[in-house]
């Protein structure tokens, strides 16, 4: 079947696979370094406890068969090693079926992590990585021409990512229709980056241009992905440019980078390098790709129905394997930035004059003089959930108490998620949390104080709390 292959996209496929392998590597390393405090046996939301109430059909995972922290670490580091090898091109030296199996193992390992990750893994980019990773299984390797059906499925995925995000905005917050959301977004986004303050201080007419350009890129440009070349390449290029703008303006884990990677297979790079002579694909491969295409199209019913619905949901999976999902972000934009500041004291009885020492996080705002850091595509899961905690205590109810308890115990794994421990010699006697209103300083304030932020106390978030006599250390109850 000559129509089955698209040799002109040989280089585009190769670049996409390398980019996807790099993002898999980031995801697995992040899981390995953060899981013990978040979902480990003694974590805030332990996997063993979750699995007692989550059957295999609802949360398919290798950890349904066995869980221990050592086994989880082994799976995560194995995923990282396999990803690094793919990044180096190892799968291109193997037979087609072996390369496909390699990609499938990566997908299954990360699916196993996401399906036990609970609220720590409830982000749209987790499903996006899994959906892209599933399609990558069927893209072939350097020894085969890319199958045109899978290339179209990748465009279909990119279309849903962009178009779904555009629809959720235009239907959601009125400020998107008035083109005023970006008056606030750069300041109130979950984790600002080092340039976010400069983006926030752009003139308001430029913010309106930003919002209008966002609507064009997300609602009109994605349709052009399905047009002939070179229009499709130009559309993909516009999406890449928009995503790079977002990379510069904030930290959104690997969402922007994966969207950029998904745009690459739509770009015709044949002028840069001619494909080598490639054998005809085996019949079993053609049949398998056609079957997968039919499956994806059938599973697209619910995401399409969601997109056309006035009650469109953001970032939702319709099957436990995360094969075909719906996407979208920032249907509502906050006007005010709140931050939960966590503090401890070693005094035995808190008094009005008690000295409280602040726990510093790696990414989220705290110290007003500290310049926000660039962490994306690495995902600081605790820092992101602290943003939600500031929006409403309900978001933090399942895990915040466990977090405070671990601070009171000087839990090593939890403290590794933070930038520093203000109590290196002994645990604090009390921990409290306070809610502050944060705003970026203007140029004059920045010059006068050297501060990046200014903050104003709002209210107590958690009163001074200590371990009660007889409390069992976290994770041993």
Image (cartoon, rainbow, N blue to C red):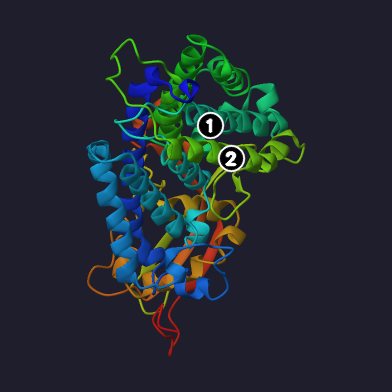
Name which residue lies at 26% across and 75% down.
Answer: 426
Residue extending farthest to the bottom is 470
Q: Secondary structure at mark 1?
A: helix
In the rendered image, the quadrant that contains the C terminus is bottom left
Disc 1 crowd rating (10 Å Cα; few below 14, some 14-19, many 20+) is some
Q: Is residue 120 above or below residue 25?
A: below
286, 91: nearer the viewer: 286
Give how far across and how far down residue 280 sits, in percent. 37, 27
Q: Is residue 373 left or right of residue 249?
A: left
Name which residue lies at 44% across and 22% down.
Answer: 240
205, 70: nearer the viewer: 70
Q: Is residue 446 above or below residue 411?
A: above
236, 414: nearer the viewer: 236
Give how far across and how far down residue 298 sits, in percent. 65, 41
Give how far across and how far down residue 202 sits, in percent. 48, 20
Res. 310 image quadrant: top right
Q: Is residue 413 above or below residue 191?
A: below
Residue extending farthest to the right is 310
Q: Which disc is residue 283 wearing?
A: none
**Pointer 1: what residue?**
153
Q: Are marks 1 and 2 in contact (CB under 8 Å)?
A: yes
Res. 157 image quadrant: top right
Q: Which disc is residue 296 wearing?
A: 2
Give how far across and how far down residue 89 sits, in percent. 24, 36
Name which residue lies at 65% across and 31% down.
Answer: 169
């Amino acid at each position: 079947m000559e129509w089955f292959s698209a040799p002109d996209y040989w280089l585009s496929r190769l670049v996409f696979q390398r980019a996807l392998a790099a993002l898999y590597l980031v995801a697995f390393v992040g899981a390995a370094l953060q899981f013990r405090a978040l979902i480990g046996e003694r974590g805030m939301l332990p996997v063993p406890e979750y699995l007692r109430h989550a059957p295999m059909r609802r949360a398919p995972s290798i950890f349904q068969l066995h869980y221990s922290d050592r086994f989880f670490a082994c799976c995560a580091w194995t995923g990282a090693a396999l990803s690094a090898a793919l990044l180096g091109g190892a799968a291109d030296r193997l037979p087609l079926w072996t390369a496909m199996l390699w990609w499938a193992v990566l997908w299954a390992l990360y699916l196993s992590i996401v399906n036990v990750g609970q609220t720590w893994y409830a982000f749209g980019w987790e499903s996006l990585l899994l959906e892209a990773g599933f399609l990558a299984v069927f893209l072939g390797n350097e020894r085969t021409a890319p199958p045109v059906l899978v290339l179209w499925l990748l465009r279909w995925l990119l279309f849903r990512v962009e178009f779904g995000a555009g629809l959720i905005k235009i239907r959601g917050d009125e400020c998107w229709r008035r083109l005023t959301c970006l008056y606030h977004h750069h300041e109130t986004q979950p984790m600002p980056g080092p340039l976010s303050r400069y983006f926030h201080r752009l003139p308001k007419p430029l913010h309106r241009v930003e919002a209008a350009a966002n609507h064009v890129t997300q609602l009109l440009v994605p349709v052009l992905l399905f047009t002939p070349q070179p229009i499709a390449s130009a559309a993909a290029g516009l999406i890449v440019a928009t995503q790079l703008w977002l990379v510069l303006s904030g930290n959104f884990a690997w969402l922007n980078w994966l969207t950029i990677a998904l745009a690459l297979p739509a770009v015709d790079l044949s002028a840069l390098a001619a494909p080598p002579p490639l054998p005809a694909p085996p019949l079993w491969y053609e049949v398998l790709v056609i079957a997968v295409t039919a499956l994806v199209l059938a599973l697209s019913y619910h995401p399409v129905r969601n997109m056309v619905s006035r009650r469109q949901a953001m970032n939702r999976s319709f099957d436990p394997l995360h094969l075909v999902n719906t996407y979208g972000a920032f249907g509502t934009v906050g006007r005010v930035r709140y931050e939960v500041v966590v503090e401890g004291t070693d005094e035995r009885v808190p008094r009005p004059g008690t000295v409280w020492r602040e726990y510093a996080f790696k990414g989220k705002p705290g110290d007003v003089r500290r310049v926000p850091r660039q962490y994306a595509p690495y995902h600081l899961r605790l820092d992101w959930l602290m943003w939600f905690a500031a929006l409403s205590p309900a978001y933090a109810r399942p895990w915040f108490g466990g977090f405070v308890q671990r601070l009171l115990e000087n839990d090593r794994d939890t403290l590794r998620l933070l930038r520093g421990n203000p109590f290196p010699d002994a645990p604090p006697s009390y921990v409290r949390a306070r809610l502050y209103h944060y705003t970026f300083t203007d140029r004059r304030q920045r010059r006068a104080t050297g501060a990046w932020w200014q903050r104003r106390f709002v209210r107590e978030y958690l009163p001074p709390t200590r371990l009660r006599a007889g409390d069992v250390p976290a994770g041993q109850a």
